[in-house]
Amino acid sequence: TDQRRSYTNERVYRRRNGSALPVLVSVVVVREDGGTVSRMVCFVVDQREQHAATARLAASEDRFRRIFDEGLTGKALTDDTGQILSANAALAELVGLPADQLISRPLTDLFAEPLDQQRVAALLSAGDGDLHAELPLRHEGDRPVWALVAMSWLTEQDERRVLLAQLEDVTARRVAEQRVGGPLQPVELGGSRATALALVFSELLQNALEHGAGRIEIELAQRGGDVVLAIA
């Protein structure tokens, strides 16, 4: 009976033009009963397309990670049970906690109202679908925070399902709406009105810097026939 033994190795060769040629080399050694090698079978498979696909995937994952980590919108990834796997600095600031303290917390803990927690739990239980709503958040300093929330499911490379939650801070607008007693509509200004507002913004920013403010939020909107400037 033939005794077969195989070897597999990935190697990189150089073509005549100097370009790299990655290949997967498989060798099968066939021996007779006495141990004498009777023949060898060699397979060489071009790996260039696989290497290119791997590089494209790595670049795509790197872009996603930079957008996730450095974005101004709060972001979190959770597993299919709702436990937070990663959170960016913007989300940490939004809820008043260090990013590392958000890891392993239930995503539902970010929301202030039990009904909203139930909506998020239902999305996690379904394992499919999405959620888009403006919801109040639970802030560690007990200050009111509202966010425009968008949640959707993603499939990882290893086929795991994860939930991506994105939260955009809309607190300044919500506070302004409470002050004027109703929803505000975005407004576009031009000409002398835009120039006047630019001067107001400049003065506000200068005052904020002089008083050591680390952050200032300005919301320009329209309520009926009036232009409302909300500052927080």
Image (cartoon, rainbow, N blue to C red):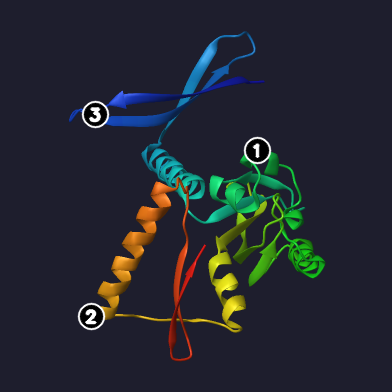
Q: Earlier in the sequence, mark 3 or mark 2?
A: 3
- The image shows residue 164 at horizontal and vertical percentages of 61, 56
Tell me the distance, in whole angstroms, between the alpha carbons under discs 2 and 1: 47 Å
Tell me the distance, in whole angstroms, between the alpha carbons under discs 1 and 3: 49 Å
Q: Quadrant of residue 200?
A: bottom left
Q: Is residue 78 above or below residue 130?
A: above
Q: Determine which residue is flagged by label 1.
A: 100
Which residue shows up at 44% across the image and 48% down it?
Answer: 211
User: Looking at numbered disc 3 in the image, what kind of residue is underneath it?
Assistant: Arg
Q: Earlier in the sequence, mark 2 or mark 1?
A: 1
User: Looking at numbered disc 1 in the image, what kind of residue is underneath it?
Assistant: Asp
- The image shows residue 111 at horizontal and vertical percentages of 73, 60
**Is residue 170 something that shows in the picture?**
no
Q: Earlier in the sequence, mark 1 or mark 3?
A: 3
Under circle 1, the secondary element is helix
Tell me the distance, in whole angstroms, between the alpha carbons under discs 3 and 2: 64 Å
